[in-house]
Image (cartoon, coloured by chain):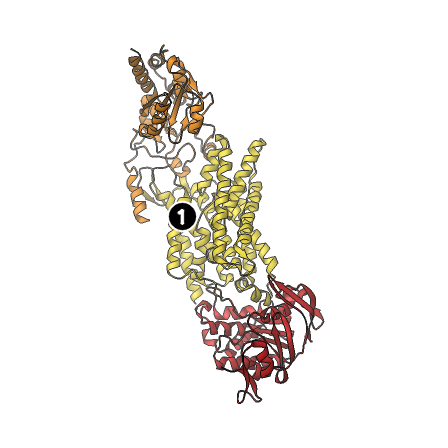
C-alpha cells in the first residue's frame, strides 16, 4: 500500500504553480484542446488550472477533468473564468452550483466539429476578452483545400482504435476534414461508434485509415490484405485533439496525401 | 400446568415425526431416549414451540405453545439447545443476561446462575474463548437466569453430552430444582446414568414415534432398551439409589 | 473500565480522522498544507458531513447484517446490497431518461432500497439449505454471484444511457464523497441513519440474542421474523441511502463492525454507537487520504482508497483473530 502510494506520488507533478500576473483574469481550462489554444493565444500566464491530460504547461496544477473537479482545489486556484469543452455530459457535478455561489464564470466551448475547431481560437479569445489573429484562418483554408485524388480510396472508414474497433463518425472533425478534401467516409453515423470486425467489413470500404496507435492495427492490417482493402495507419498526436495543433497535423497529412498522388 | 401433545406430527425434509400424543406432568423430569435420528431433538423442539408442527396441537397449561407471542413464550418456557451458539466478542455475563431479555434486568439472578454452573469468575471473559463444556454451562446458566415464577416448562437437549461427570450431576440437581418449582422438565439424553438417576419418567423414541412411556423404573429396563437400541443393556447397581439400566460393552 | 478506555480511544481516532480531513490538504503546488483555510472550509465541512453520514450508514448496515446472519464476512458490499442499489438507481436513471423525466433524490433512495433488498433476499434464498439453514460460506458465495450479476445490470444500464447521462453515473459508480452534497440526498441519508441507529440501539439486547442460534433467540423471547424483516429493510435502506450519496463503497461496512467489536466488545448497546463512529471515521479518513494523495487525476475516486486500504485492514483483523466466527 505505502509503496503504491509512494509510486503514485512520484508520478505527480510537484513543481510550484506559476502564478498568474496580478490583476489579470485567472483562467482554468478543463480541456486539453482549450489549454493548447490558450497557449497558442499567448495566454499561458493566465492559466491557473488544467486537467491531468493537458501537456506543455508544467507548473499549472491539475484540478479536474470534464467529468470530475476537485472543488476545494478549484477554489484554491481562485479562478475568474472556467473553460469547459462542451460535451453532451454537461458540466462536472457541483461545478455550476459552486460557480454561481462564488462568482466564477463558466463557459462551455464546443470543439466537436471541424467548424468548431476552426473557430475555437476566436471563441476562446473572446471568452478571455482578447482578440485572435486573423492569420490562422488562412492557414486553415490552406490545410483544408480539396484534393482531387481521394475518390478512388473512398468510401473510407476512419478508425480511432483498432482493438476494439472504434470508428470516427461523420460529425467528428477528422471525418469532416476528409470530406473537405473530397473524400467519402463511412459509416454515416455520428459520434465514435464501436463496431465488430464483421460490422466493419460489412461497410465494404475501399480503404481503412487508423489514426492512433499503429502496433494495435497489425491484425486488422492482415485482414484488410486478405480482402484487398487498402490499410494505412497514421500515428500523429496532433490529429487526435481538437486544438490548434490539429491545423498543422491536418496540413502535414494533406501534404503526404498530395505527395503520394504525384 | 401440564404439557399436552395431541396427535402432534412434524415433517422435516424426509424425516417424519409422530403423530405423538403425550402428557407431561409438572414437578417431574421426563427423559427422552432413543437411537440417533429417532427424533428426540425434533420432539423436544416441537414441544416448546420452536419447531413448526404439521398437524395436531400442543398446549401448556391449556395455552397452545405455537400461538404464544415471543415474550409470553420466554416467560413460560426455558430451553437449552444441544449445541449453543457463542457469539463473538460477547462476554459470559452478557450471554447469561440474555436469558432475561424480556424481563426486568437482574444482575443478582445472573450472578446466582453463573455461580450455579461454576462460571462466576469467567463472567467478564469472551464466550468464544470457552470450551464446549463451558459453553454448555453458559447456556444452562442462561436458562437458570430465565427462570421466573411464570416458568412452566424447562427443556434440555442433551445437557450432559459435553460435561464431565461432576457437572452432569450438577445439571441433574438443577433440573430437579426446576421440577421442584413445579415446572415440567423434559430432557433429551443419551446418558443412561442421568436417565436412571435423575429422571422420573422415560419416553422411548424410535423412527419418529414414541415406543413406550412411563416411570423410568418400569420402562427403562434392559429388555426394552436392548430392543430399542439393538445393543445389550444390563442392570447396573450402585449408580443411583435404585438399579439403572446401562449399555453393556 | 475497559469500555471507558475503548470509548476514549475511539473518540480520539474519530476526532483525528475529522481533523485530518479538515486541516490537511495538498496545495496547488503539490506540497502538503496544514491548517484551517476559510476558503476551503465549506467544501471540507461538506465532505466531512457526507463522509461521516455515509460511512456510519454503511457500517451500521454491515453490523446489522453480520449480527442477523451470524456471518463475519457479511457486509452491504459483499452481499450485493450496494450493487443492488447501484443497479436499481442506474436502471431508474435509464427509464427516467427514456420517459423524459428526472429521478428525484428521494425516489432514487427508495428505488435503491428496493434493489438492495432484492440483492439481500436473493443471497439469503440461495445461501441457505433446508437441512443446515444459512451456511456462512454459501451465503458469501451467493453474495459474490448476486453482486456480479447486479454489477452487470448496472453496467448494461449505464451503457444504454446516452453520453449526456453516462459520465455522471459512471463517476458516481466509482465512489466519491461529495464536498457539495445534494441537500435532499443528505437529508434522506441522515433520516434513514437516525431511525436505524435509534432502532438498533434500543433493540441492542435483542440483537445480542439474535446472534445466538435461532432456537436460543426464540427461547429467550426474540420475535425473530419481525426482527429479521426490520433488519432486511433497515440494512437495505442504509446501504441504498449511502450509495445514493457516495456511490458503492467497499469494506467500510465490513471492517467497521469488527473494529468496533474489537474495541468495545460485542454487546450491541456499545457496538452500535461504536460502529457508527468507526464507520464515519473510516470514510472521512479515506476521503482525507484521497485529498492528500498527489495523483495526477484531478480527483482520485474514494472507492479506490476504500478498497486499497480496507482490504489490508480486513486481512489484518482476520490475522489478529478479531473476525470472530459464530461458534456452534
Q: Position of residue A241 (x, y in %)?
A: 36, 25
> Could you tell whether C297 is left or right of B89 in the image?
left
- What is the total number of numbered labels drawn onto the structure image? 1
Q: As displayed, is residue A225 above or below residue B78?
A: above
The residue located at (49%, 75%) in the rendering is B162
Q: Quadrant of residue A103?
A: top left
Neighbourhood count class around disc 1 (C-alpha, 10 Å): few under 14, some 14–19, many 20 upward? some
Q: As displayed, is residue A19 above or below residue C205?
A: above
Q: Position of residue B234 (x, y in %)?
A: 55, 85
| Shown colour of chain A | orange
Can you tell which chain is drawn red?
A: B
> Could you tell whether B231 is left or right of C27 in the image?
right
* Quadrant of the rendering where the N terminus of chain B is positioned: bottom right
Q: Is residue B66 visible?
A: yes
Q: Secondary structure at mark 1?
A: helix
Residue in the foreground of this view, choosing between C112 and A80: C112
Q: Is residue B151 visible?
A: no
Q: Position of residue B77 (x, y in %)?
A: 62, 71
> Could you tell whether C218 is left or right of A116 in the image?
right
The residue pinned by badge 1 equals: C307
| Shown colour of chain C | yellow
Residue in the foreground of this view, choosing between C308 and A217: A217
Q: Chain letter for mark 1, please.
A: C
Q: Position of residue A63 (x, y in %)?
A: 37, 35
Q: Quadrant of residue A249?
A: top left
Q: Quadrant of residue B59?
A: bottom right
Residue in the foreground of this view, choosing between A50 and B142: B142
> Could you tell whether A138 is left or right of C208 in the image?
left
Residue in the foreground of this view, choosing between B36 and A260: B36
Amino acid at each position: 500500500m505505502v509503496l503504491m502510494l509512494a509510486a503514485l506520488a512520484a508520478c505527480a507533478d510537484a513543481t510550484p504553480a506559476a502564478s498568474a500576473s496580478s490583476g489579470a483574469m485567472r483562467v482554468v481550462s478543463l480541456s486539453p484542446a482549450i489549454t493548447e489554444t490558450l497557449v497558442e493565444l499567448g495566454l499561458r500566464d493566465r492559466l491557473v488550472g488544467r486537467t491531468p491530460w493537458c501537456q506543455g504547461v508544467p507548473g499549472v496544477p491539475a484540478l479536474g477533468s470534464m467529468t470530475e473537479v476537485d472543488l476545494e482545489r478549484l477554489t484554491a486556484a481562485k479562478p475568474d473564468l472556467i473553460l469547459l469543452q462542451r460535451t453532451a455530459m454537461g458540466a462536472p457535478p457541483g461545478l455550476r452550483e459552486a460557480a454561481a455561489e462564488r462568482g466564477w464564470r463558466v463557459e462551455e466551448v464546443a470543439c466537436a466539429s471541424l467548424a468548431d475547431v476552426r473557430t475555437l481560437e476566436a471563441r476562446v479569445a473572446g471568452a478571455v476578452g482578447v482578440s485572435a489573429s486573423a492569420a490562422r484562418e488562412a492557414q486553415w483554408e490552406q490545410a483544408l483545400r480539396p484534393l482531387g485524388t481521394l475518390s478512388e480510396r473512398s468510401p473510407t472508414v476512419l478508425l480511432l482504435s483498432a482493438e476494439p474497433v472504434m470508428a470516427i463518425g461523420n460529425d467528428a472533425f477528422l471525418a469532416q476534414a476528409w470530406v473537405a478534401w473530397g473524400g467519402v467516409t463511412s459509416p454515416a453515423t455520428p459520434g465514435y461508434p464501436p463496431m465488430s470486425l464483421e460490422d466493419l467489413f460489412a461497410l465494404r470500404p475501399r480503404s481503412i485509415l487508423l489514426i492512433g496507435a499503429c502496433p494495435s492495427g497489425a491484425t486488422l492490417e492482415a485482414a484488410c490484405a486478405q480482402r484487398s482493402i487498402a490499410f494505412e495507419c497514421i500515428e500523429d498526436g496532433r490529429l487526435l485533439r481538437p486544438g490548434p495543433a490539429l491545423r498543422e497535423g491536418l496540413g502535414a497529412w494533406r501534404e503526404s496525401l498530395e505527395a503520394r498522388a504525384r | 400446568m401440564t404439557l399436552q401433545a395431541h396427535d402432534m406430527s412434524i415433517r422435516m425434509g424426509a424425516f417424519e415425526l409422530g403423530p405423538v400424543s403425550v402428557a407431561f406432568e409438572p414437578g417431574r423430569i421426563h427423559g427422552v431416549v432413543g437411537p440417533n435420528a429417532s427424533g428426540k431433538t425434533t420432539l423436544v423442539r416441537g414441544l416448546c414451540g420452536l419447531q413448526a408442527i404439521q398437524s395436531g396441537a400442543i398446549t401448556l397449561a391449556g395455552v397452545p405453545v405455537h400461538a404464544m407471542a415471543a415474550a409470553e413464550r420466554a416467560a413460560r418456557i426455558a430451553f437449552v439447545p444441544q449445541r449453543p451458539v457463542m457469539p463473538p466478542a460477547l462476554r459470559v455475563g452478557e450471554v447469561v443476561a440474555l436469558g432475561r431479555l424480556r424481563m426486568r434486568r437482574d444482575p443478582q439472578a445472573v450472578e446466582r446462575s453463573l455461580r450455579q454452573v461454576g462460571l462466576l469468575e469467567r463472567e467478564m471473559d469472551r464466550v468464544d474463548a470457552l470450551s464446549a463444556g463451558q459453553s454448555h454451562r453458559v447456556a444452562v446458566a442462561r436458562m437458570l437466569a430465565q427462570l421466573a415464577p411464570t416458568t412452566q416448562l424447562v427443556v434440555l437437549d442433551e445437557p450432559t453430552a459435553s460435561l464431565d461427570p461432576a457437572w452432569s450431576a450438577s445439571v441433574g440437581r438443577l433440573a430437579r430444582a426446576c421440577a421442584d418449582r413445579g415446572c415440567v422438565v423434559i430432557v433429551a439424553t443419551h446418558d443412561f446414568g442421568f436417565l436412571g438417576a435423575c429422571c422420573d419418567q422415560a419416553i422411548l423414541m424410535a423412527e419418529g414415534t414414541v415406543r413406550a412411556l412411563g416411570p423410568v423404573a418400569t420402562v427403562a429396563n434392559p429388555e426394552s432398551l436392548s430392543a430399542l437400541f439393538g445393543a445389550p443393556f444390563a442392570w447396573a447397581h450402585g449408580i443411583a439409589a435404585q438399579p439403572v439400566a446401562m449399555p453393556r460393552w | 473500565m475497559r469500555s471507558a478506555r475503548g470509548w476514549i480511544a475511539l473518540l480520539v481516532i474519530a476526532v483525528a480522522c475529522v481533523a485530518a480531513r479538515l486541516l490537511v490538504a495538498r496545495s496547488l503546488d503539490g506540497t502538503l498544507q496544514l491548517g484551517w483555510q476559510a476558503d476551503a472550509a465549506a467544501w471540507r465541512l461538506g465532505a466531512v458531513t457526507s463522509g461521516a453520514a455515509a460511512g456510519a450508514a454503511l457500517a451500521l448496515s454491515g453490523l446489522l447484517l453480520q449480527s442477523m446472519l451470524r456471518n463475519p464476512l457479511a457486509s452491504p458490499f459483499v452481499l450485493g446490497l450496494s450493487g443492488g442499489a447501484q443497479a436499481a438507481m442506474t436502471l431508474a436513471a435509464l427509464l427516467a431518461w427514456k420517459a423524459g423525466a428526472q429521478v428525484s433524490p428521494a425516489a432514487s433512495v427508495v428505488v435503491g432500497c428496493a434493489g438492495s433488498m432484492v440483492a439481500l433476499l436473493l443471497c439469503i434464498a440461495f445461501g441457505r439449505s433446508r437441512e443446515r439453514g444459512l451456511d456462512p460460506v454459501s451465503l458469501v458465495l451467493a453474495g459474490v454471484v448476486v453482486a456480479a450479476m447486479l454489477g452487470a445490470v448496472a453496467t448494461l444500464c449505464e451503457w444504454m444511457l446516452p453520453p449526456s447521462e453516462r459520465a455522471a453515473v459512471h463517476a458516481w459508480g466509482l465512489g466519491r464523497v461529495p464536498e457539495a452534497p445534494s441537500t435532499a440526498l443528505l437529508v434522506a441519508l441522515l433520516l434513514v441513519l437516525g431511525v436505524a441507529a435509534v432502532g438498533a440501539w434500543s433493540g441492542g439486547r435483542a440483537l445480542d440474542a439474535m446472534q445466538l442460534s435461532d432456537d436460543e433467540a426464540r427461547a429467550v423471547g426474540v420475535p425473530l421474523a419481525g426482527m429479521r424483516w426490520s433488519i432486511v429493510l433497515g440494512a437495505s435502506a442504509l446501504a441504498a441511502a449511502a450509495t445514493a450519496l457516495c456511490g458503492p463503497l467497499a469494506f467500510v461496512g465490513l471492517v467497521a463492525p469488527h473494529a468496533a467489536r474489537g474495541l468495545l466488545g460485542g454487546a450491541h448497546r456499545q457496538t452500535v454507537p461504536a460502529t457508527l463512529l468507526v464507520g464515519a471515521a473510516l470514510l472521512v479518513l479515506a476521503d482525507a487520504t484521497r485529498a492528500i494523495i498527489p495523483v495526477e487525476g484531478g480527483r482520485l475516486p474514494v472507492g479506490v482508497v476504500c478498497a486499497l486500504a480496507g482490504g489490508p485492514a480486513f486481512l489484518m483483523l482476520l490475522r489478529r483473530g478479531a473476525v470472530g466466527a459464530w461458534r456452534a
